[in-house]
Image: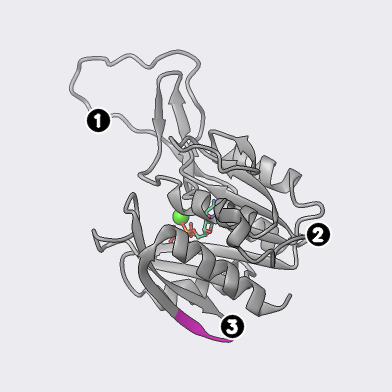
Amino acid sequence: AKALFQPQDLSGKSLVITAGPTQEAIDPVRYLSNHSSGKMGFALAQAASERGATVTLIAGPVNLATPAGVNRVDVVSASQMYEAALNSIAGCDVFIGTAAVADYRPSSAADQKIKKDGSGAERTITLIENPDILASIGHHENRPATVIGFAAETQKTEQYAADKLQRKNADAIVANDVSRSDIGFGAANNEVLWVSDQQSVPFGPASKRDVAHFILDQILNLGN
Ligand code: CTP
Ligand code: CA
C-alpha cells in the first residue's frame, strides 16, 4: 500500500543496483569478505521500485528479503558481480554501485581444503586485484546515462569521494564516514555526502529508506 503513495517519478526508468559484500574463495570452505550488510542497496532497490522504476538488484551474499517487484540476481564473487553487471547494462538508465566489492581475491582458489602443516611457520595468501565494476561501467561505450558510486571512508571523506568521481567517471559519489559506529556498515541509520561535479550535499542522519529517497531525488535533479 505504501507504494501507492509514492510519486511514480521513476516510471519508464531502468535501474541496476549492486549490493552487499562479495566473497573471494581461498579454498572450498574459506573465503575473504567484509562486513557489508547490503541494507543500503536493498533500500535503494525498494525505494526505486516503489517510485515506478524497473529494478535489477545484483546481490552478493546477504541475509535480506528481495523487495517486491525487484528482479534479483545473486552472485558470490567480485568476478561474478562484474559479469552480471556488464550483462545488465543494455537498456539501463541508471547504474548504482552500492556493493562493497572485494578489491582483491586469492590468485588461485585451492581445489581441496588447505591443511595446516602444524609447523607454526607463517603462511601467505597471494592476492590479485579484482575488476573495478563501477569504473568499467563509468567508462563503458554503452555507459548508462547516470552512473552513481558509493564510498566508505575513514578519513578525508570529501577528497577521496571527489577522486573516485573522476577516476570512475561517475556522475556522483555517495560518501559516508565508516569510522563512526553510529552510521554506516550494518547500522540502521546513515549520514551521507552526495558529491557531484556541481555540488556536495550532506543528508542525514536518517533511515536508510530516507537516504535512498534522497539519493533518487538527487539522481532526478541531475536531469541526465
Ligand atoms: N567498486 C566496484 N568494483 C570494485 C571496487 C569498488 O564497483 N572492484 C565500486 C563500489 O561499489 C563503490 C565505489 O566503487 O560504488 C567505491 O568503492 P571503494 O571501495 O570506496 O573504492 P576503491 O576504488 O576500491 O578504493 P579504496 O577501497 O582504495 O578506497
Ligand atoms: Ca575498495
Residue 94 is drawn in which quadrant? Answer: bottom right
Q: Can residue 132 be seen here?
A: no
Amino acid type at mark 3: Asp
Q: For this rendering, which residue is in front, 82 or 191? A: 191
Residue under pointer 3: 197
x then y, percent, for residue 168: 61, 66
First in sequence, mark 2 or 1: give its number. 1
Residue under pointer 2: 142
Q: Residue furthest bottom?
A: 198
x then y, percent, for residue 150: 50, 62
Bounds of the magenta span?
197-201
Amino acid type at mark 2: Asn
Dot in front, 3 or 1: 3
Helix, strand or loop status at disc 1 = loop
First in sequence, mark 3 or 1: give its number. 1
Q: Are marks 2 and 3 in contact (CB under 8 Å)?
A: no
Q: CA distance from mark 3 to mark 1?
A: 47 Å
x then y, percent, for residue 3: 60, 55
**Is ligand 1 less than 8 Å from the beta carbon at label 1?**
no
Residue 186 shown left or right of residue 201 in the figure: left
Image quadrant containing the C terminus = bottom right
Helix, strand or loop status at disc 2 = loop
**Residue 5 among magenta residues:** no
Residue at the spot x=81%, y=59% of the render?
A: 142
Amino acid type at mark 1: Glu
